[in-house]
């Protein structure tokens, strides 16, 4: 049977056809590479390759006074954790963003795979206003009907029996780490060794807090903060034999894996890989955790990415799109795992607030509609087809891949000049991988026409890759 990777991949052939100049949106011809740098990666920090990519100052798009002012003010008061793109967005509507100077952009980043319903969805807005007018926050000292309603809906729509709410992806993973440790302690027969270690994979990204960071493969993120949580072994993503050997009874508490890696460069697991992980975890008494923070909740055309693989985890973490732009994180798990958790083991002041949960319930109900998911599948295929068709003759193109509306365009050079040029031409996209992948994670409501426009802009901006190397 064809693997998901087989289904999802559309390879593109390189050739030598590229143009030195592109058409500016209003019809003027202008060079595409400008000095406005600051490509957006999912973490908003340029990696080495991006930083070293030369930019060409042939035709600089000037920053407005207001944008410059905010950049200067920001520098004076914020800790410099972000290498931001020099643009000041002030409004969003559907799949469009507008900057302070009134320029329109097609949003193919969706706030890093967050704004699945686009900007200002009317039902989401109604839910937020309704709940804000009633009761926004109460803490987890008290019961909340909105929280219970969302948890019921998540349980009804998934493998899970129990839900834990957090405020972000990293927090959801942090909770899953603690639940794994507690589960192993709780379920161990006294003379057995206690399984406390974790397995993660190459190109993984699980977050920035000390536990989730320990599971994140990229050394740039991890090494400056060592020691992080000890006991993590990294295995090559997709390497079945290595994974089988590494999952050891009485040692491995849990395996954390993204069914489709986002930040790492849009790599899809194969069915065989995830099924092997499931079987090895079963044999070893190890928990299998799917991090669907980026690939979950409809982005692949399946409600949960693991639905494409017919494999069920013991825990799944969610975050980004669930509350339509409000901060949320979730751990979904089974009764068996939840039985190990007692009051006081974990918690959060903010998590699962009525405001966030009411908004999230609205988002979940909309996304899980079969017609909505079918639309994502159709548009995802169309996007890959468009990109393959339009871009394949460029010599820098290596591959177009992904599933649904999580799509990566791998290049043989740094993607940042292209990302910058696209932004100047009115298209917002991200980088991923080692900085050589253009990541497209648009709002799931995007239209085919907007996808066509986006693909056309990418095509027009391809010469920026050569200009950057000149
Ligand atoms: C797969 C995955 N897990 C975890 C995280 C961390 O989420 P957050 O930034 O909300 O903490 C991310 C963020 O990009 C992610 O892509």
Image (cartoon, rainbow, N blue to C red):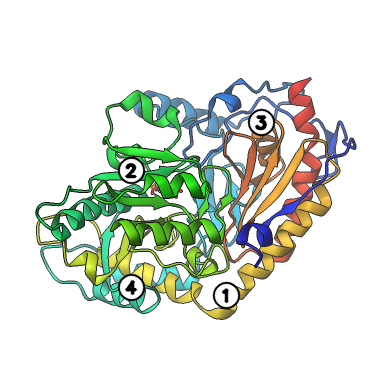
- Between disc 2 and disc 3, the foreground one is 2
Q: Position of residue 422 (x, y in %)?
A: 70, 41
- Quadrant housing the C terminus: top right
As helix, strand or loop, the secondary structure at mark 1 comes to helix
Residue at the spot x=30%, y=77% of the render? 152
Mark 2 in CB contact with mark 4 (< 8 angstroms): no
- Between disc 2 and disc 4, the foreground one is 2
Residue at which label 1 appears: 372
- Between disc 1 and disc 3, the foreground one is 3
Residue at the spot x=50%, y=63% of the render? 305
How many C-alpha atoms fall within 10 Å of the one at disc 4: few (<14), some, or many (≥20)? some
Name the image quarter holding residue 271: bottom right
Height in image: 245 above or below 331?
Answer: above
Earlier-in-chain disc, 1 versus 3: 1
Residue at the outermost right position: 17
As helix, strand or loop, the secondary structure at mark 2 comes to helix
Q: Position of residue 326 (x, y in %)?
A: 37, 57
Residue at which label 3 appears: 414
Earlier-in-chain disc, 2 versus 3: 2
Residue at which label 2 appears: 212
How many C-alpha atoms fall within 10 Å of the one at disc 2: few (<14), some, or many (≥20)? many
Distance of mark 1 from mark 4, alpha carbons? 24 Å
Q: Nearer the viewer, residue 286 or 113?
A: 286
Q: Nearer the viewer, residue 253 or 145?
A: 253
Mark 2 in CB contact with mark 3 (< 8 angstroms): no
Please state if 322 lies on the left or on the right of 391 as rendered: left
Please state if 401 lies on the left or on the right of 352 as rendered: right
Distance of mark 1 from mark 3, alpha carbons? 34 Å
Residue at which label 4 appears: 130
Residue 319: tell me if it is visible. Answer: no
Q: Nearer the viewer, residue 152 or 44?
A: 152
């Amino acid at each position: 049977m064809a693997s998901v990777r087989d289904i999802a991949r559309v390879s593109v052939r390189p050739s030598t056809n590229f143009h030195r100049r592109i058409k500016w949106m209003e019809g003027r011809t202008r060079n595409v590479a400008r000095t406005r740098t600051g490509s957006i990666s999912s973490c908003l920090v340029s990696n080495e390759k991006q930083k070293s990519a030369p930019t060409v100052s042939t035709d600089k798009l000037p920053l407005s006074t207001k944008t410059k002012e905010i950049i200067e003010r920001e520098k004076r008061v914020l800790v410099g954790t972000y290498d931001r793109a020099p643009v000041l967005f002030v409004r969003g509507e559907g799949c469009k963003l507008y900057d302070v100077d009134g320029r329109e952009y097609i949003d193919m980043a969706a706030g890093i795979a967050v704004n699945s319903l686009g900007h200002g969805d009317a039902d989401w807005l109604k839910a937020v206003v309704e709940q804000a007018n009633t009761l926004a926050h109460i803490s987890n000292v008290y019961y909340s009907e909105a929280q219970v309603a969302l948890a019921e809906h998540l349980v009804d729509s998934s493998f899970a029996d129990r839900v834990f709410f957090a405020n972000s992806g990293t927090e959801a993973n942090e909770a899953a780490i603690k639940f794994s440790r507690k589960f192993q302690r709780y379920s161990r027969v006294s003379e057995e060794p206690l399984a406390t270690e974790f397995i993660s994979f190459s190109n993984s990204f699980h977050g920035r807090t000390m536990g989730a960071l320990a599971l994140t493969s990229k050394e740039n993120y991890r090494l400056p903060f060592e020691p992080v949580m000890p006991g993590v072994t990294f295995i090559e993503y997709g390497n079945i034999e290595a994974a089988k050997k590494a999952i050891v009874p009485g040692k491995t508490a849990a395996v954390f894996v993204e069914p489709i890696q986002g930040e790492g460069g849009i790599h899809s697991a194969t069915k065989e890989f995830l099924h092997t992980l499931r079987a090895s975890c079963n044999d070893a008494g190890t928990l299998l955790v799917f991090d669907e923070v980026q690939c979950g909740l409809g982005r692949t055309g399946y409600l949960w990415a693991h639905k494409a693989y017919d494999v069920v985890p013991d825990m799944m973490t969610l975050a980004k799109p669930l509350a339509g732009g409000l901060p949320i994180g979730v751990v979904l798990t089974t009764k068996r795992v939840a039985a190990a958790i007692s009051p006081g083991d974990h918690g959060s002041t903010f998590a699962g607030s009525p405001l966030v949960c009411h908004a999230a319930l609205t988002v979940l109900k909309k996304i899980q509609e079969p017609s909505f998911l079918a639309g994502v599948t159709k548009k995802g295929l169309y996007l890959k087809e468009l990109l393959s068709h339009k871009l394949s003759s460029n010599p820098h193109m290596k591959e177009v891949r992904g599933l649904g509306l999580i799509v990566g365009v791998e290049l043989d050079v740094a993607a940042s000049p292209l990302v910058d040029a696209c932004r100047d031409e009115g298209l917002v996209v991200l980088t991923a991988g080692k900085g050589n992948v253009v990541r497209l994670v648009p709002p799931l409501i995007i239209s085919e026409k907007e996808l066509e426009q986006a693909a056309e802009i990418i095509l027009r901006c391809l010469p920026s890759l050569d200009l950057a190397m000149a």
